[in-house]
Image (tube, rainbow, N blue to C red):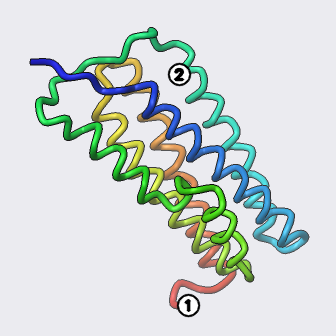
């Protein structure tokens, strides 16, 4: 039997994750300007905006009916919701604001950004696995590669500013 996987809901979660990442990077760029990390945060904000637009286009292209995949125990849908709920920026907006309020230093901001990007990669890998259409899987693969590239950028910046042993 085929059980519905709600691709609409999963893409809305992905859009929310990107939107919250965009908010974080803009806030961090503004908060730490003119420090060196602010330039990196500004660039990542622009890229998150592009990722959000990409997911919005994917959502707009979906048919009105939910995609169907073989998932008799509804595990994929439950797992994606659990992964999203654990994502550092896919929480109640007030909690996100409190997390952002706790960022006091560039080091705090970069460490939080690294956690955000790791969470995003994990969620998007699961989203890809749940996608039935090959074109969607390829599209999400590109975004996973972008998020992994963000991790490398942040790791370089962290090492440049604080050394790898900090």
Residue that badge 1 annotates: 166
- Please state if 149 lies on the left or on the right of 23 as rendered: left
Question: Which residue occupies 60% across, 44% down?
Answer: 18
Of marks 1 and 2, the one in the foreground: 2
Disc 1 crowd rating (10 Å Cα; few below 14, some 14-19, many 20+) is: few
Q: Nearer the viewer, residue 14 or 72?
A: 72
Position of the N terminus, as image quadrant, is top left
Q: CA distance from mark 1 to mark 2?
A: 41 Å
Where does residue 38 sit, x and y in percent of width and height? 80, 66
Badge 1 or badge 2: first in the primary sequence: 2
Q: Looking at the rendering, in which quadrant would you find the C terminus?
A: bottom right
**How many dots with numbers?**
2
Q: Nearer the viewer, residue 109 or 15?
A: 15
**Up-down: is 68 above or below 75?**
above
Image disc number at residue 59: 2
Residue 121 bears which disc, if any? none
Residue 52 % position (x, y): 63, 35
| Helix, strand or loop under label 1 | loop
The residue positioned 51% from the left and 66% from the top of the image is 115
Q: Position of residue 55 (x, y in %)?
A: 56, 29
Dot 2 crowding, Cα within 10 Å, few <14, some 14–19, many 20+: some
Q: Secondary structure at mark 2?
A: helix
Q: Residue at x 62, y 76 (%)?
A: 158
Note whether 101 is above or below 52 in the view shown: below
Q: Residue furthest bottom?
A: 166
87 to 36, vertically: above or below: above
């Amino acid at each position: 039997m085929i059980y519905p996987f709600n691709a609409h809901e999963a893409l809305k979660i992905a859009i929310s994750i990107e939107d919250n990442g965009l908010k974080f990077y803009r806030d961090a760029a503004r908060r730490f300007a003119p420090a060196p990390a602010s330039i990196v945060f500004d660039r990542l904000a622009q890229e998150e905006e592009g990722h959000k637009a990409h997911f919005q286009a994917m959502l707009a292209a979906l048919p009105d009916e939910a995609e169907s995949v073989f998932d008799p125990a509804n595990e994929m849908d439950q797992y994606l919701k659990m992964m999203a709920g654990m994502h550092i920026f896919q929480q109640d907006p007030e909690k996100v604001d409190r997390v952002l309020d706790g960022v006091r230093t560039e080091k705090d901001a970069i460490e939080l950004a690294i956690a955000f990007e790791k969470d995003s990669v994990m969620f998007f890998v699961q989203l890809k696995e749940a996608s039935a259409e090959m074109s969607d899987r390829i599209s999400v693969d590109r975004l996973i590669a972008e998020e992994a590239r963000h991790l490398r950028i942040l790791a370089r910046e962290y090492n440049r500013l604080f050394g790898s042993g900090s």
